[in-house]
């Protein structure tokens, strides 16, 4: 089957470019010409049809020289490249490119753990390093440092950090915890950020800022350069660890929980990312929906009550952990009892009391930096793996939490889907993650989910809530909502795009940032 | 000072040095591919999303993929490369064809 190509590229140009790339990096690392392995680069779980966004080819470099050679050829023929690292950005697109026919630049072969420094507690890694890989390395070498994995743990440190992913330990804001990047620009220019630009430095991974403008953020959630190395701070293993769960009986408790969490987080009484998790999110890693309800539409309240009773869960389930010397943890736990534990109906559970609880166990692992795949078991709720995440940001207030919850739940039920969600408080902000799960074998249901997602974006924006990250299919729509002063920020992104990537070869359309030659067709800024 | 060190868990850190980077052994042995890509979902104790789903559909006897010789190599290759339901495909950069053969040998070993 002939590959779908971008309409500005002739089959002859494409073929010549691919041949030249194969000559440059080795033909065994170039996949094209209808090779069935191209199918492993599709997004298996989205609201789009099964074969949407399949790339025309894949090139897999192993180092800077390879990348620079590929970029040179791509610039000559204007081949659009879509960089991925571990390719596990599922719910947001996985390894698939923004548009069908792009050439995926697969960085997975670059998976070296270049340095782990136990004294200063950091690692320097390439983009292909996964959370599982770094964790295994630390374990095998008896290094007393914790990673902060995403859930599930098959993702990668660099990719997740560049996508502004969050984790579960006190180092849960991944971008905040990165320190130093090496970047290749679309024209092949290689540079390092921060202290990394000082040739004799030994401070690249201990000081984030260097001298002059801080450019690191420009290369996150963008299409301005390819990050080839990144430093990541790791948490020293503490002398004590105390995870806990507090269950709450009523939906409306979310307001008070959130109000109480805010000062506990802003004052750093709770050191890690604090999660208030909806009943079904916790239940879905243990049971399938059909075990409780075989009808159509969202699961009824009577079944929810039965799940709560069977698994001793709350309508809301609050997870956090304490770290440090035991006397410090005990003192802080008393503060937790006096605050979150004092909300009527609250019940505090210890690790010992939930030692056979799958949900508690995987969160307990995540909060101490142990990667696992348990959360992916959520997919078994409906089966088939169809899911897409809606993730708006708000201040940490009870009013905002309830407003978002009621708004999304109402729409979700109206469209026939369960509300499955959680609220994560990092420091001052709140990430609301709504997992829209659907049966991918039903085209009607998949399209219904797609329509719902689009409505949620616009309704949330009208209420002042913007998404922090989104699926490929909705990048333009979300970008349009960040419209203050006549889309001034996206106009600036476009100016940067033109400066860094004048031929528009790198990830066109990523985050709604289009290069000049595609702007007339796609952009809304002029 | 000793008490401070033991209380804060710093003893190991004070004596540590920077470690050189790790170059992974390739082709990757089957057991390591198992740990990196399979075990998280297909835990032999029946935990993990893959094992749970297989148990629900096919019962206890077919919930494990490790040691399950009814899963023939051609079937494993097809599922690994194409994915199946909740399982995402593994790309040739995740695991090469040669490494996939080593993984299959490991899965079939007693």
Image (tube, coloured by chain):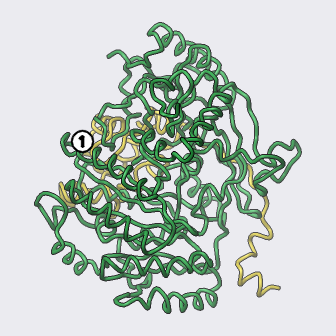
Chain colours: A green, B yellow
Q: In this rendering, would B1 be left or right of A247? A: right
Q: What chain letter is assigned to the residue under label 1?
A: A
Q: In this rendering, would A432 be left or right of A291? A: right
* Residue sitting nearer the eye, A456 or A72: A456
Q: Measuring 71% from the left and 80% from the top, which residue is drawn there?
A: B8
Residue B60 position in % (x across, y down): 21, 61
Q: Measuring 76% from the left and 36% from the top, which residue is drawn there?
A: A191
- Residue A96 lies in quadrant: top left
Residue reaching furthest to the left: A295
Total labels drawn: 1
* Residue sitting nearer the eye, A374 or A207: A207
Up-down relation of residue A132 to residue A186 (above or below): below
Residue A205 position in % (x across, y down): 75, 54
> What residue would you read off at disc 1?
A447
Residue A450 position in % (x across, y down): 29, 44
Q: Measuring 22% from the left and 74% from the top, which residue is drawn there?
A: A307
């Amino acid at each position: 089957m002939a590959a779908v190509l971008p309409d500005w590229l002739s089959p002859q140009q494409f073929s010549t470019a691919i041949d030249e790339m194969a000559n440059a990096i080795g033909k065994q690392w170039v996949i094209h010409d209808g090779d069935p392995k191209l199918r492993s680069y599709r997004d298996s779980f989205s609201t789009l049809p099964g074969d949407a966004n399949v790339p025309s080819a894949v090139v897999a470099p192993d180092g800077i020289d390879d990348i620079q050679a590929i970029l040179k050829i791509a610039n000559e023929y204007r081949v659009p490249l879509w960089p991925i690292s571990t390719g596990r950005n599922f719910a947001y697109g996985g390894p698939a490119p923004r548009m069908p026919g792009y050439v995926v630049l697969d960085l997975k072969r670059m998976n070296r753990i270049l340095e782990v420094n136990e004294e200063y507690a950091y690692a320097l890694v390439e983009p292909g390093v996964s959370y599982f890989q770094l964790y295994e390395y630390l374990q095998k070498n008896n290094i007393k440092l914790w990673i902060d994995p995403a859930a599930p743990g098959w993702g990668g440190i660099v990719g997740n950090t560049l996508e502004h992913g969050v984790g579960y330990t006190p180092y849960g804001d991944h971008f905040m915890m990165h320190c130093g990047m090496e970047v290749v620009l679309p024209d092949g220019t290689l540079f390092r950020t921060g202290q990394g630009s000082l040739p004799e430095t030994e401070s690249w991974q201990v000081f984030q800022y260097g001298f002059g403008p801080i450019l690191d953020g420009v290369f996150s959630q963008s299409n301005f350069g390819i990050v080839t190395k990144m430093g990541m701070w790791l948490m020293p293993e503490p002398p004590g660890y105390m995870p806990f769960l507090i269950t709450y009986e009523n939906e409306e408790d979310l307001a008070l929980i959130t109000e109480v969490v805010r000062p506990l987080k802003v004052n750093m009484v709770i050191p890690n990312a604090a999660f208030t998790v909806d009943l079904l999110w916790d239940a879905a890693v243990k049971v399938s929906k059909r075990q409780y309800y075989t009808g159509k539409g969202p699961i009824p309240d009577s079944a929810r009550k039965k799940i709560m009773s069977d698994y001793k869960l709350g309508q809301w389930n609050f997870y956090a952990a304490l770290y440090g010397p035991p006397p410090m943890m005990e003192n802080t736990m008393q503060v937790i009892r006096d605050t979150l534990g004092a909300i009527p109906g609250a019940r505090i559970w210890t690790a010992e009391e939930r030692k056979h609880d799958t949900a508690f166990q995987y969160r307990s692992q995540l909060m101490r930096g142990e990667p696992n795949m348990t959360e992916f078991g959520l997919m078994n709720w409906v089966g088939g793996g169809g899911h897409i995440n809606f993730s708006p940001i708000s201040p940490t207030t009870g009013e905002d939490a309830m407003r978002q919850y009621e708004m999304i739940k109402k729409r979700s039920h109206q469209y026939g889907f369960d509300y499955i969600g959680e609220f994560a408080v990092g420091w001052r902000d709140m990430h609301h993650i709504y997992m829209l799960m659907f049966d991918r074998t039903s085209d009607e249901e998949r399209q219904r989910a797609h329509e719902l997602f689009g409505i949620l974006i616009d309704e949330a924006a009208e209420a002042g809530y913007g998404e922090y990250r989104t699926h490929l299919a909705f990048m333009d729509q979300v970008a349009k909502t960040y419209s203050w002063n006549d889309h001034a920020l996206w106009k600036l992104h476009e100016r940067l795009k033109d400066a860094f990537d004048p031929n528009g070869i790198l990830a066109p359309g990523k985050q709604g940032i289009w290069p000049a030659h595609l702007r007339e067709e796609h952009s809304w800024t002029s | 000072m000793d008490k401070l060190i033991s209380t804060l868990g710093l003893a190991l850190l004070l004596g540590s040095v920077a470690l050189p980077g790790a170059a992974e052994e390739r082709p990757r042995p089957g057991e390591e591919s198992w740990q990196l890509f399979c075990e998280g979902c297909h835990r032999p104790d029946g935990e993990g999303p893959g094992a749970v789903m297989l148990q629900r559909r096919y019962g206890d006897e077919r919930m494990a993929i490790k040691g399950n010789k009814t899963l023939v190599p051609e079937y494993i290759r097809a599922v690994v490369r194409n994915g199946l339901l909740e399982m995402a495909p593994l790309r040739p950069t995740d695991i090469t064809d040669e490494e996939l053969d080593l993984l299959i040998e490991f899965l079939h070993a007693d």
